[in-house]
């Protein structure tokens, strides 16, 4: 196998008009070491794409710097000399095309594919950027351009769950999922009532929304204010986890207030209330009467 074929096979490039002329190691503008594949792209173009006449002549070359997929975590580039053509009839020019990369783009399909595959493994933008030898903002740009979220799910489940989570920095985002299968229905970038209402009203008809039987929420009072408007037949259920969490916090508050009223900091009661806080959260049947009892 020739050098050209070996390198093209490594990068899974199948363009027959592309010929590798050499490989080298260079330093880019940020002083980073890069592997460069030098290649030329040329073929016999018969008709002018502008006027259709068969009067094309070769008119020099144009150098394109393309980003290839990575082989061992480094940065790989292709310096591609593309053939230029000029029409003797209309005097317009055009260049040789390749399926390796989209028009006026630097990132080849190969590196874009690598980014998408790594993103499926739940890696962060920074980690993908490091593995592919590109910047995190480029990773984000590739993902935004190639991943299209569904406009809506096909069928709205009968039982829904609403919750919120901290997505980035201090932003809270809204998440809705199927209460039975736990399948994600939608994730919105914020949790504003207006945006949640807009999302469901724009995508689901009144009939579809009327089939929802229950919506499970946390103790966010805002949700309760619009659930009946969106889902007229749905019962609002407060999630058990959040009720238990609230009861646990109330118990802890009461315990800490009691600790503050104890004057003697060396008493047994003070130490037990301060250090044995887990005992107060135990299920009654799990409490050992002999070892874990508190005699007040
Ligand atoms: Zn022409």
Image (cartoon, grey):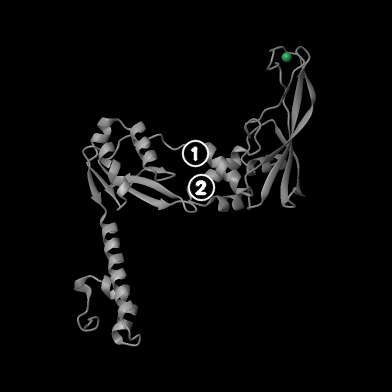
Q: Residues within 10 Å of mark 1 (few under 14, many from 20)?
A: few
Residue 155 location, quadrant: top left
In the rendered image, residue 295, in percent from the top left (x then y), is placed at 21, 83
Residue where numbered disc 2 is placed: 119
Looking at the picture, does residue 56 appear above or below residue 132? above
Whole-percent x and y of residue 43?
Answer: 72, 26
Q: CA distance from mark 2 to mark 1?
A: 10 Å
For residue 282, the mark is none
Measuring 25% from the left and 52% from the top, which residue is drawn there?
238
Residue 294 in the image: state x and y as whole percent: 23, 81
Query: Which disc, if any, is residue 147?
Result: 1
On the rendered image, what quadrant is the N terminus found in?
Answer: top right
The residue depicted at 66 percent of the width and 52 percent of the height is: 74
Secondary structure at badge 2 equals: helix
Dividing the image into four quarters, tell me where ligand 1 lies.
top right
Quadrant of res 157: top left
């Amino acid at each position: 196998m020739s050098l050209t074929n070996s390198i093209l096979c490594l990068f899974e490039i199948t363009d027959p008009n592309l010929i590798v002329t050499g490989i080298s190691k260079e330093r880019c503008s940020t002083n980073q070491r890069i592997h460069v594949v030098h290649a030329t792209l040329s073929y016999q173009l018969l008709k002018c794409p502008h006027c259709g006449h068969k009067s094309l002549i070769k008119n020099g070359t144009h150098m394109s710097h393309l980003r290839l997929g990575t082989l061992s975590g480094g940065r790989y580039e292709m310096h591609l000399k593309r053939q230029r053509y000029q029409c003797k009839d209309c005097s317009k020019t055009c260049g040789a095309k390749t399926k390796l990369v989209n028009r006026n783009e630097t990132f080849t399909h190969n590196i874009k594919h690598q980014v998408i595959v790594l993103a499926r493994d739940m890696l962060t933008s920074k980690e993908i950027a490091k593995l592919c030898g590109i910047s995190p903002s480029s990773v984000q740009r590739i993902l935004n351009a190639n991943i299209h979220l569904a406009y809506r799910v096909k069928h709205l489940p009968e039982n829904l769950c609403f919750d919120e989570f901290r997505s980035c920095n201090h932003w809270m985002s809204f998440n809705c999922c199927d209460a039975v299968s736990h399948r994600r229905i939608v994730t919105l970038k914020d949790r504003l009532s207006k945006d949640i209402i807009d999302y469901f009203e724009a995508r689901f008809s009144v009939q579809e929304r009327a089939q929802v039987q229950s919506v499970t929420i946390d103790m966010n009072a805002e949700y309760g204010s619009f659930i009946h408007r969106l889902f007229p037949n749905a019962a609002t259920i407060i999630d058990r986890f959040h009720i238990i969490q609230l009861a646990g916090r109330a118990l802890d508050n009461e315990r800490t207030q009691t600790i503050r009223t104890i004057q003697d900091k060396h008493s047994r009661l003070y130490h037990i209330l301060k250090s044995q806080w887990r005992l107060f959260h135990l299920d009654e049947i799990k409490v050992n009467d002999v070892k874990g009892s508190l005699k007040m």
